[in-house]
Amino acid sequence: MGSERTERYDIVVCGGGLAGFCAAVAAARQGASVCIVQERPVFGGNSSSEIRVTPHGAAQFHAYARETGIISELLVEERAANHEKVRENGWTNSVWDMTMYDMAVSTPNLTFRLNTTVTDVVMNGPREIRAVKARVAGAETELTIEGKVFIDSTGDGVVADRAGCEWRWGTESRDEFGEPHAPLQASGATMGSSIHFRAKNMGRPVPFRAPEWAVKHEDPAYFYKQGRHFYDLASGYWWIEIGVPWNTIYDNEDIRHELTRHTLGIWDWIKNRDPKLKEKAAPYALDWIGQVPGKRESRRIIGRYFMTEHDPANRTVFPDEIAYGGWFIDLHTAGGLLAPTAEPSSAEGYSETSEYAVKSYCGPYGIPLRIMLPKDVDNLMTAGRNVSVSHAALGTVRVMATTALMGQAAGTAAAIALRDGIAVADVPEARIKDVQQQLLRDGCFLPNVRNEDPADLARSARAEAGSAELVYGAGPDGRDRTGGFRPIAALEEVPEPLTERRGQWIAVGADEIRAISVCLSNGTGSDQTVEAVLQPVDHIWDYRAEAHPPLASATLVVPPGRKRWIEWPVGLRSDDGLVPGRYVRLDLKANPHVEWHMAGTVLPGHVSAFEMGGGRMRRYRDGGTLSFRIEPPQPSYGASNVLSGVARPYDYTNVWRSDPAQPLPQWVGLQWETPRRIERVELAFPGHLFREYHGYPPFYRDPQCPEEYAIEAYANGQWKELVRVSGNYRQRRGHDIPGGVDAARLRVVVYATNGDPSAAVSEIRCYGS
């Protein structure tokens, strides 16, 4: 007969992918009793070792846009511990699974039920869920799991569907919302599911014979003219994808089998038939083929707000902003391998300046809580790819790093609602500021919200430091201080003709700019001219080519020669509209006979972009620094940045950096007019933000992050060490001060970094009384 039992929790999270996992951990950290129900033996969903899709997010397209909070904690730990190089697909191993498992086990208030499938929902009337029914695989156990709030992160919206919520499926017509990416006619077509493979170089020729039931490929055009690119022999391809004519929920097993047939057939083509690859692929052997399809789309649960592609495209500012996205509007072709071409951006060779690329590029943009609040049930939330968005908007919000942020927000909002005795449906009106401030305190970033935590004692302090780095600029031969993140152009001397307008962000710290120089090459035999413009911008992702009226403009004359420094005597002061503590962007307009060289390093917070078309810009190469010099040098990394309310480069550098010419230790601190009782100090360090996760090597520890530091308080006429930490590589650390300390000054002393000559801190928070 098996076993039956009932369990009770404050919050029940259904689904253990990144969205559900982050929701469960966030809620438990807020003190709620939480149970997460996951039908697989491991956490991570599509990112797990069963499916092996690396988590993508905003930093793939925007410098310094990597997601922080719980997802960052996990990824930082995984990179520090894992020997495996991250490839785009197929290379996730069990180190990632165990990183998540360790966090789950180590989180107080969190219970998890793995290998457990939600089978039904028990209602208390039409608008309230009382419990979910679940079955533990291989254990002959039936569970009834009661809760006060439920979070559906099943991907397929299983709980919401069983609870009677309205949902959408397929594509909306263009007429319905006027979305540029919507087809003319609505349909039931969804993006498909994928499986990946992994191959290993054996160092000698290895034969491969496909089984008779594998798909046979004979036509090179299927791959080379239809956008199915073999970008990496050792790992699988996202385009091994099938959806229609099968249903991504009900026909999941059929899809798995068809994907397996195609994967073996594609490997057979690579190994035995492809005229370009078979010799190169000769030593490769199949090492693994996934057997759990990774889904992109199924049910989308209708919430209290319905997000369309106009919101990310126009960067709509929502009062209930709780997360952000920055992936492009990435809509895979229905049918996948059965369609005439792969998804559009791949089919056109990933052009960065095509009409499709221009209309698809978006973000970073805010995401509202209301898309996670189903309109039909009052104690249910959603998080993940099943939220209330159109098919077109799903193209950008569906990627895993973005859904992880939504999950953390859902868990935080649910816990705060229970703490304050209100319905989760009322949070957007009644408690949204509390949720936003808690998310910021827990390490998340919100584009339109700053730290305004009334309990943070640091906000009433004045910042001070022993030294601060000045920005002189950087040249193409500059010493790399990034731990391997030198721009590709600087490493390989890639030609960099000014075929389009290009811009370099410069953080202004002084009340004047006397001169700016740029490093240019002119390969012709005569002088060339380049139009230069200096204009204010709102932040580092202000991609409008003409963001504001220019502060200054000039015509630069570039004589023939390589890597010449061309000076522009700008002569700008604050009376001319220059604003210290903000960015300006130096733009050079197109002249293909001139090259503007990348710097040999990345100056923190100094990014670059190019005009892609339609008056819009996008990240240039990796967003690294273009060569420039500035006079006078700018004090852009001062101590006050630790109190800016933003813990990453955005509207300014928002980081204190010590003078790299002075040896460590270096310090930054706070000073109050009268002593404060300090019981806890929370720190944010720079690093792990510039690029997306898969750009980071094995055993990576960001050079900018302090490796050894101490927290000291000035009391009774002397400095007293409260905390000492060594071996650090984490971006955020919180320290309780046993018994508290009464002090009018507190400082963070950095004794060693993980490689950067400058000490650096992004934010200091203090709590007590």
Image: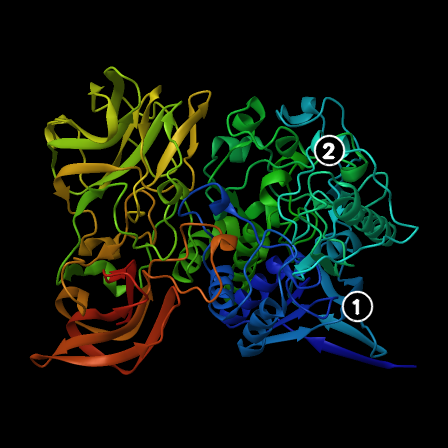
In the rendered image of this protein, does residue 284 appear above or below residue 136? above
In the rendered image of this protein, does residue 31 appear above or below residue 697? below
Q: Secondary structure at mark 1?
A: strand
Q: Answer left or right for 117 relative to 401.
A: right
Q: Residue furthest front?
A: 204
Asked if disc 1 and disc 2 are in contact, CB closer than 8 Å, the reply is: no
- Residue 133 circle label: 1
Q: Position of residue 9 (x, y in %)?
A: 64, 73
Q: Residue at x 23, y 53 (%)?
A: 641
Q: Answer left or right for 4 relative to 615.
A: right
- The residue identified by callout 2 is 171
Q: Residue at x 33, y 51 (%)?
A: 646
In the rendered image of this protein, does residue 618 appear above or below residue 666? above
Going by the numbered disc 1, the residue's amino acid type is Lys
Q: Secondary structure at mark 2?
A: loop
Q: Position of residue 476 (x, y in %)?
A: 28, 41
Q: Residue furthest bottom?
A: 739
In the rendered image of this protein, does residue 125 appear above or below residue 332? below
How many numbered marks have been drawn onto this rendered protein structure? 2
Q: Residue furthest left?
A: 717
Q: Residue at x 69, y 39 (%)?
A: 276
Q: Position of residue 558 (x, y in %)?
A: 22, 21
Q: Nearer the viewer, residue 539 or 339?
A: 339
The answer to which quarter of the image holds residue 504 is top left
